[in-house]
Image (cartoon, grey):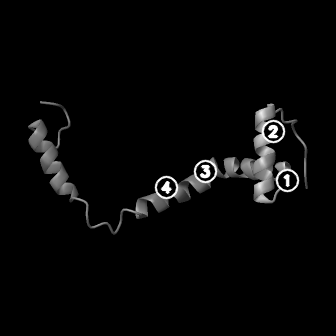
Amino acid sequence: MSLAIAELHLTEQERTALEAIAQSAGKTPDELVHDAIKQLIAQFQPDDRLCLLRRARSMWKYRTDLPLLADLRREWDRRTGSNDGDLTPH
């Protein structure tokens, strides 16, 4: 089901660019606008965001080139003069 909800006002430059992109993509300008709206909606859907966050988290899981958290903590403590986990500058 298709529903027209708004008229799109473009500058001449935007219209020309949209038509050129549509031609090279083998789509109509309307199809490109529709695709862009679908991408925008998908980007801000909470479930999609959670999925992206989970994928981003797992990309670090098998990295072997990163220092251990304990080593990072010791370095932080050494630099700040803290040895009790207190993050207050000394």
- Give the Cα distance between marks 3 and 4: 11 Å
User: In the picture provided, is 19 more to the left or to the right than 67?
Assistant: right
Whether 57 is drawn above or below 13: the answer is below
Q: Which quarter of the figure is the C terminus placed in?
A: top left
- Give the Cα distance between marks 4 and 1: 33 Å
Residue type indicated by callout 3: Pro
Q: Position of residue 86 (x, y in %)?
A: 17, 38
State the residue position of label 3. 46
At horizontal 66% and vertical 52% (from top left) the residue drawn is 42
Q: Which element is circle 3 on? A: helix
Residue type indicated by callout 1: Thr
Dot placed on the residue nearer the N-terminal end, 4 or 2: 2
Residue type indicated by callout 2: Arg
Task: Tell me the number on the disc at residue 28.
Answer: 1
Residue type indicated by callout 4: Leu
Whether 71 is drawn above or below 79: the answer is below
At horizontal 25% and vertical 60% (from top left) the residue drawn is 66
Kindly tell me whether residue 33 is visible in this rendering. no
State the residue position of label 4. 53
Disc 1: CA contacts within 10 A as few (<14), some (14-19) or many (>=20): some
State the residue position of label 2. 15
Residue 87 figure quarter = top left
